[in-house]
Every structure is written in C-alpha cells, then in structure tokens.
Amino acid sequence: MILSVNHIRFMYPSRPVLDDASFSVNQGELLAVLGTNGTGKTTLLKCINRILQPAAGSVLIGGESVDALGRNALAQKIGYVEQQRSGSRATVFNAVLLGRKPYIRWDITRHDAAVADGALEALGMSGHAFRFLDELSGGELQKVNIARALAQEPEVLLMDEPTSNLDLKNQLEVLKLIRQITRDRGIAAVMAMHDLNLALRFADRFLFLKGRKIHAAGGPDVVTPEIIESVYSVPVTIVSHSGNRIIYPL
Amino acid sequence: MVEKTPAAVLPVSSTDAFLQSSARKRLILLELAILTLLLAVFALHAGAADTSPLQVLRALLQLDTGISNVVIWNIRLPRILAGIAAGAGLAVAGCVMQTSLRNPLASPSTLGISHAAAFGANLAIVFFGAGTIHSSTQDAVLIGNPYLVTLTAFAFSMVAMTLLLLLARLRGFSPESVVLAGVAFGSLFAAGSTLVQYFAEDVQVAAMVFWTFGDLGRVSWQEVAILTVLLTGAFLYFLLHRWDYNALDSGDDSAAGLGVHVEQIRFRSMLAASLVTAVAVSFMGIIGFIGLVAPQIMRRVLGVDHRYLIPASAVTGAALLLFSDTLARTMISPVVLPVGAITSFFGAPMFLFLLAKGYSKR
C-alpha cells in the first residue's frame, strides 16, 4: 500500500465539507472518486496534497506522514493535475519542465530536461514541445498537465476531473494513457470524476462520496444501481456489452 | 570508386532544442547588457557641458581636476547610475507584480504606490513649506527642501503598500483583490493630491507639478547607494524564486502542487517590489511606463520563463530609462525635458509594435 488516508476531516469557515474519510491505494492502482457536485471530491484531493490543511486525520505515503515533509519533498512524492484551466503563454516544454521544480537547487540540469522530454514522449506530445499552451486543444493541454505531473516522478498521482471539457475521443485517449502509465510506473492514482461509465471502464477501485462522508468504497462490485441511485438520486440500470458494464440512467 | 553516403541527419531532441534556445536567450541577455553599457558610456559624454571623450576618460581616471571632473563625478555619473538602478528597479518590480498578481497591467503606477508617493510629496510642499521658487538657467521652480519631500513621499508610498498588503492578506491574498485594492488606493491618493493642489498657492502648485515630472538629476551618490543596495537585495530574492514565478503561471493550486508556498511568495514578492518602487519614486518622482512596459516587452521577446525574464526586464528597464534621460538632457539642451514623458513617448510605440508582432516562440 502506497497511499493511506486516515480519518480526514475538513471544514470551510461556512460549512463542513469532509468528515472521517479513510481509504488506501496500492501501487499501480487507479481509484475513481465519485459523487455529486460540491460533495468534496476536489477538497479530498487537496487535503491529500496539503494544498488544504485538514482539521483532523492523517495522510501517509509509504508509511511516512505528509505533515513531516516540506513542500518540495511532498511535490517529489505527489503529482497533482488540477481541473483544467486555460493555457498560458509558456511553451509546452517549459510547462512540463516545471514538474522538475521540486528537484531544482539553483537551475535545471540536462537530466531534468531529459525527464521532461521523456514525460512528453510518454504522452505522445514530443512534436508539440515548442508550441504555446494557449495554442493547444483541450486534450493536448490536459496531456501536458499530466506530463508535468509525471515529470515530478511521483509515487502518487492526483487528478481532478482530468477528462472534463474533452471530447469523447480525447476522453478515451487520455484515460487510456493514465491507465497505462500508472500501471507501468507503479503509481498510485486517485482521480475525481463525473462520468460513471468512464470510471467503470478504466478505474480499479471506486469511492462514492455523499453527505461529507464516504458512502461506499470497493472494487467494481461496489458500482451497483442501488449505490448509484442513493448517491445521485437517479435510477439507473447496468447492462453488459462486449464484456464491459454500461450504466444507463432510467 | 567508393560512393559517398550523405551524412545522417540526426533529429534534434526536445532537450537539445531547449538547451539551444536557453543559450540563445543568454546571448540576447548579454547583448542587452552590452547595449546598456554602451549607452551609459555615451551618456557620460553627452550633455550641456561640452566634454570630449578624452576629457571624460581623464575625469573618470581622476587625471583631470577641472570642470569636466566635477561634471562627470558630481552630475553625470550619479545621474546615469541612478537611471540604471531606478530603471532596473521599476522594471523588475513591475515584472514580479505582473506575475504575482497574474495581471499584465500590474505595475508600480497602476497599484497606487506612485500616486501615494506623489500625495506625500504634495503634502510636504504645501503643509511643510518645502516648495519654493528658484531661478536658474534650467529650472524656474525647484523643491526647496528635497529631503523632507522625499521622506514624506516614501512614508506615504509605504502607507499605501502596507494597506494594500494588509487588505490583500485579509482577503486571502487573491490576485484580483490586490489589483482592485491598488486601483482604489491610486484613486484615493490622486483625489487627495487634487484637493491639496486646489488649496495650494501658485508657487506650490508649480513645485508639485515639477515633482511629479520625475527627474534623475535630483539624486546624489548617497541616494544611488541606498537604491542600489535595496535593488540588489530584491533582485537576488526574485532570482532565487524564479522557478516559483514560473510555477505561479500555471495557477495557484498547480503551483502549490509543485512545491510553492503560494501566499508566502506572493506576499514577500509584493513587499520587495513595492519597497524598491517606493524608494525609487521618492528619490526621483514619478517615472511611469517603465514598470509596465519593460517586462511586457521582454515577455514578447524572450517568453515567460522568469530565469531570463527577470534579468532581461531589469536590463531593459535600465536601458529605457537611461536612453530617455539622455535624450531628455540633449534633445533641446540646455533645457532638460521631463524624463517620464520621454519614457512613455518612446516606450509606447515600441510596445505597440511588439504587441502587434506577438510573442517569441522559444
């Protein structure tokens, strides 16, 4: 087990968001965090990464508490891909090179540039290295964000709705790459998502949030019409097609 | 006969291309620095007092004790060094403000710091009796008590800076709130200046207007030294955090995920940038445009990588102010034109040209 989240509680001044959230993720495993809007998916990811400081609970990576790590040391262990925002005037290569920031003492080395190069190649973006971010399509931009996180050489990868705003082709392409890379590199990945069918297709385990708490968690078996209806208040049915389970809202 | 095979064309990796582009940017930086140095040498020679290059050299080496020695060491050299330090300081402050607040319009003047300094100077001229008439060949009006004016201007720019940072901290330091608060403070101090001017006498109004023109000729070696020490400290801090500024470009949460203490870096950067601005403006008056335009020009020429953008903004700011001041001194010599007007007059078209041309790729 690489990532262990224990009894996390978080409150904004106006309202509580998360209460007693506990789960763990193994190496090479992809966990989908699911739930309605405003249910605390993003907050959970930010608490793991200490972008937000939880009121209670602990996060361990390989048995070590993230509270014991400085920001750079933490960034060497956790890569974070935030919800997609518009691109800046940086070039793709410079953006991915930022993933090496936690390792930089005074300036980048040739090794840092080579790691960034490798991350771009893994995402199939080598040919775009010197384009500006604001010239890229949504899918390309998201691949750059993931490449930057990979350049951090993390043990844990947190992704906040990595396929939002992408078309179907790009959704499948990006998730396939995430699936492959996390398995190949033994990265424990946590991904907040909205699309249940994509989650079912690509994730190994599932965690449903409801009313500030973890409502259900487990393998594919936990994704049942009853659980989905209790979380989203929408009746669904699940059918099998070519070996894949597909969720239909009724 | 052995047939020659064409040499294999090796594909250039992204790493190699990136390293090549970095080398190219360092070369541009070096060229800019040399250009600024040449400009400084020319500025030493140019001016109302007729000094030949040989006389300048002899005066610099302390071989000449005549009038040219006085002109070079007491007038031109401090003025040139002040131009370099103030230009570099204002430009680098503008660069860091723009990045920290993620707003291309952020600059010492748009954030109200210059207006606060002007209000302080106006107050000193009217209520502390620091403005008088002084006749000379160059100026009809001079500030009677420049130290008092400088101190009051500095005090008020620090008040503006403190209020701005305190308010921003209360609001969780969101870039938008800082920019909006800066605009509000700017309006407030500008209104204050208008009121002070309304109740002032003609001579005092003339002194106030004179102060706001901006003038590098006001500084002595002591002020150059203060500004240089402060600028060096701030510049080193900015350079040390150049990767943090690059990360801030990708958004606050992404930057935090890359190991940046977002609020801390934003607060300290604004503090250092405001301090440099406050000192420069208090010593020399309002020199607009440099803080806004120098970093924007360099963003377009060299890109948004702060490893190059910070030093390049500093050198460009220094060169722009030095060029403008030399022009102001020599265009209709012996009359010295307001340097702030010259910086805008030449900076604006250059900026518009680059705006139309777009960004450099690498």
Image: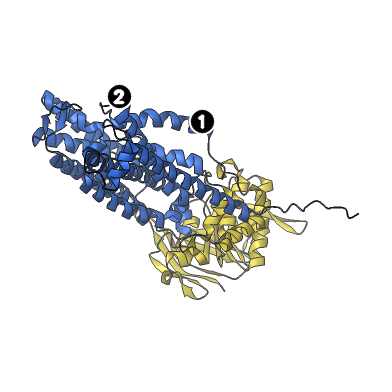
Q: Does residue A19 show up?
A: yes
Mark 1: few/some/many CA within 10 Å (<14, 14-19, 20+): few
Chain A rendering hue:
yellow
- Tell me which corner region of the image, top left, top right, bottom left or bottom right, holds residue B141: top left
Viewer-side label of 2, 1: 2
Chain corresponding to blue in the figure: B
Above or below residue B301? Residue A46 is below
The quadrant of the image that shows the N terminus of chain B is bottom right
Which is more toward the observer, A102 or B279? B279
Which is more toward the observer, A99 or B254? A99
Q: Are marks 2 and 1 on the same chain?
A: yes
Q: Tell me which chain the residue with mark 2 is part of.
A: B
Judge left or right: residue A134 versus residue B9. Answer: left
Q: How is the image coloured?
A: by chain
* Residue type beneath disc 2: Ile
The tag on residue B356 is 1
Q: Position of residue A195 (x, y in %)?
A: 61, 52
Q: Tell me which chain the residue with mark 1 is part of.
A: B
Above or below residue A39? Residue B296 is above
Q: Position of residue A49 (x, y in %)?
A: 47, 62
Q: Secondary structure at mark 1?
A: helix
* Residue type beneath disc 1: Ala
The tag on residue B332 is 2
- Write the residue at 33% across / 40% down: B54
Which is more toward the observer, B288 or B172? B288
Q: Report, in whole angstroms, how far the alpha carbon at label 2 lies from the one at label 1.
A: 32 Å
